[in-house]
Structures are given as structure tokens and as C-alpha cells.
Amino acid sequence: MRIGSSIALIAIGAILAFAVQGVVIDFVDLTMVGYILLALGILGLIISIILAATGADRRVSHTRSTVDPRTGERITRNESRDSGF
């Protein structure tokens, strides 16, 4: 769940929890569904922000050294990249 989908869940949950009061469905309490979606959206937003803040520090580096068989020269190759989601 990313930040945008968390905000969407918060908005949908708030609409169901606070704005839809007169609608009655026999087996579904829309207010409770709204509170659940609101809580899931807030939890997802917090987790997304934490993962986004810690994800900037992840960098993978690989170093590979080989010897050229013709010249006998040592060749070193360094490669680094971000490992993101």
C-alpha cells in the first residue's frame, strides 16, 4: 500500500463513517466499515511514510575483479544501484 492508496482509504472511510448516516443496509453497518477503512488507511499511511524514509538509504554495491588472460592485467568493475520497491 502506497501513500496515495492510504489517503484514498482514509477519504472513503471518513465519508462512510461521518457522512453516510441515514443509509441502512440490513447486514452491513456502514459507519463501522467507515471506521475500519479509516483505521486501515491511517495505519497504511504511517507504514508507507516509515518505509519511504528508510528506503532512501538502501544502496547495493558489487565489486568484481578478474584478470585479463591475454595481458595479465587485473580488471576491477564496481557497480552500485539503489534497491527500491
Image (spheres, grey):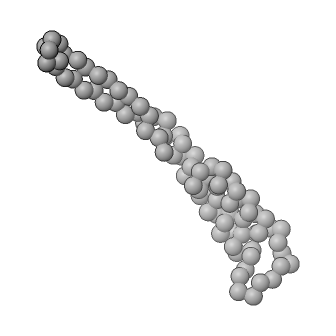
Q: Quadrant of the N terminus?
A: bottom right
Q: Residue 65 in the image: x percent, y percent?
A: 21, 23
Query: Horizontally, is 33 left or right of 61 in the view?
Result: right
Query: Horizontally, is 50 left or right of 71 in the view?
Result: right
Q: Quadrant of residue 30?
A: bottom right
Q: Is residue 16 above or below residue 61?
A: below
Q: Residue 6 in the image: x percent, y percent?
A: 64, 55
**Image point (37%, 34%), residue name:** 60
Q: Quadrant of residue 24?
A: bottom right
Query: Horizontally, is 18 left or right of 78 in the view?
Result: right
Q: How many marks?
A: 0
Q: Residue 46 in the image: x percent, y percent?
A: 59, 51
Q: Is residue 21 above or below residue 52?
A: below
Q: Nearer the viewer, residue 20 or 67?
A: 67
Q: Say whether residue 46 is visible.
A: no
Q: Quadrant of residue 62?
A: top left
Q: Residue 41 in the image: x percent, y percent?
A: 64, 59
